[in-house]
Image (tube, rainbow, N blue to C red):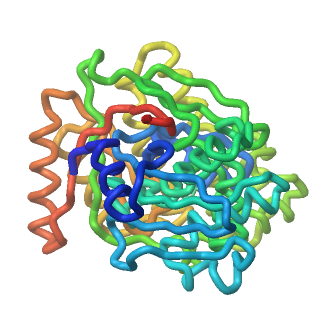
Amino acid sequence: MSASIDAGATAAAFRQLYGGEPDGVWAAPGRVNLIGEHTDYNDGFVMPLALPHSTVAAARRRDDGVLRIHSGDAPTGVVELRIADLDPVTVGGDRGGWAAYPAGVLWALRRGGLDAGGADIHYDSDVPTGAGLSSSAALEVSTALLLNDLYGLGQSAQQLASWCQKAENDFVGVPSGIMDQTASACCTEGHALYLDTRDLTARQVPFDLAAEGLSLLVVDTQVKHALGDGEYAKRRAGCEEGARILGVRALRDVPFGSLPSALARIDDPVIRGLVRHVVTEDRRVEEVITLLDAGRTREIGPVLVAGHESLRDDFTVSCPELDLVVSSAVAAGALGARMTGGGFGGSAIVLAEASEADAIRVAVEKAFASASYRAPRTFAAVPGPGARRLR
Ligand code: GLA
């Protein structure tokens, strides 16, 4: 699962498919989240970083109201859509398959009053799909960025991320927060992005692991996750119910210090768990940022583990395979580990001394083999650049 961005190959595939040159080639990365899980739809804090894995899109503007899209990964051939017919009910969600994401972005931009039009687009992607690494955000953000350029829409990276979230929420029908799209659009090389999801202020936090002799492994359990299956939406609705019971706008507004008294006001143990996770997770983001600012990167390990336990026990979005990555990695000497992304499968991250990373990877693989789980796929994450035009 090594990352490769080859603008030339994507442009060549475009030429073969559509004839003629693309107007440009753009890329948008997948992400992992270091800490701050299921906080983004609670107005809380997150800290993702961009992966070196990207969706690369070669595109050419067309002015006849038609969107043609093709993906090197999908067996669907060229999907041709009339812009006037773009509709969340007939084209969005499951009916549109992968095409709903780019179609939804164009729909959201136009619905927002922006003058985006048709295009021929070919996508190549090496972001693993269904692995909790935001392949859909990479697809959305690459589309938004190329439309922004082709039609001179003048939108900032964060604005593009917000249009992409609208596409995902209102066209595809997944009630996701703003983290993944913002990570793909706004991350920078060598940094994690500390984002306040309420006012969208962000800070680039230096995260140069190699310089510190550290390694961040991403372990894809290959257990496929699907955010659309209702469990994610259930957690989100439960958090909103918690905020309603506590009389706050969002769970971000429950101070950590008053958590015990807040929990005492909630009868439903499920809602209590959701609230406890979100409030403690926001606190963990603060702890991690304080440690990183102080140059004490190794000490974030236990905070990551505490985050995993909270997602497992209070938020109930882990699964046995993710739990096994964490327990086997920690037993083999990792500094910390936790599931990353929405959960229900997907990937975990493991923070380790660079010199021990390989032994830890082997230990996790052995643990998976002993449990008769499918072999996981592991790679080291180096914080890469956010979305950009390649040519
Ligand atoms: C998914 C969603 C994000 C976020 C994470 C959990 O990746 O798309 O908005 O809620 O789950 O932190």
| Residue beneath the point at 26% across and 26% down | 214
Q: Quadrant of residue 29?
A: top left
Residue 63 on image: x %, y %:
67, 60
Q: Residue furthest front?
A: 20
Q: Is residue 203 above or below residue 330?
A: above
Point out the residue furthest to the right here: 247
Residue 260 in view, yes or no: no
Please tell me which residue lies in front, 361 or 87.
87
Indicate whether 236 appears above or below 8: below
> Looking at the image, which residue is at 14% across and 60% down?
367
Q: Is residue 81 above or below residue 32?
A: below
In front of the other: 230 or 191:
191
Instruction: Count all numbered tags in the image, as a single digit.
Output: 0
Classify residue 55 as left or right of residue 102. Answer: left
Most foreground residue, 219 or 101: 101
Residue 57 locus on image (x, y percent):
44, 51
Q: Is residue 24 above or below residue 188?
A: below
Residue positioned 48% across, 59% down in the render: 121
Ligand 1 rendered quadrant = bottom right
Taking the spot 9% from the left edge, 68% from the top edge, the residue there is: 370
Q: Quadrant of the C terminus?
A: top left
Image x and y of residue 262, in percent: 78, 53
139 left or right of 325 in image: right
- Residue 189 vs residue 132, the one in the foreground: 189
Q: List x then y, in percent, for residue 58.
A: 44, 50
Direction from residue 206 to residue 74 in the image, left or right: left
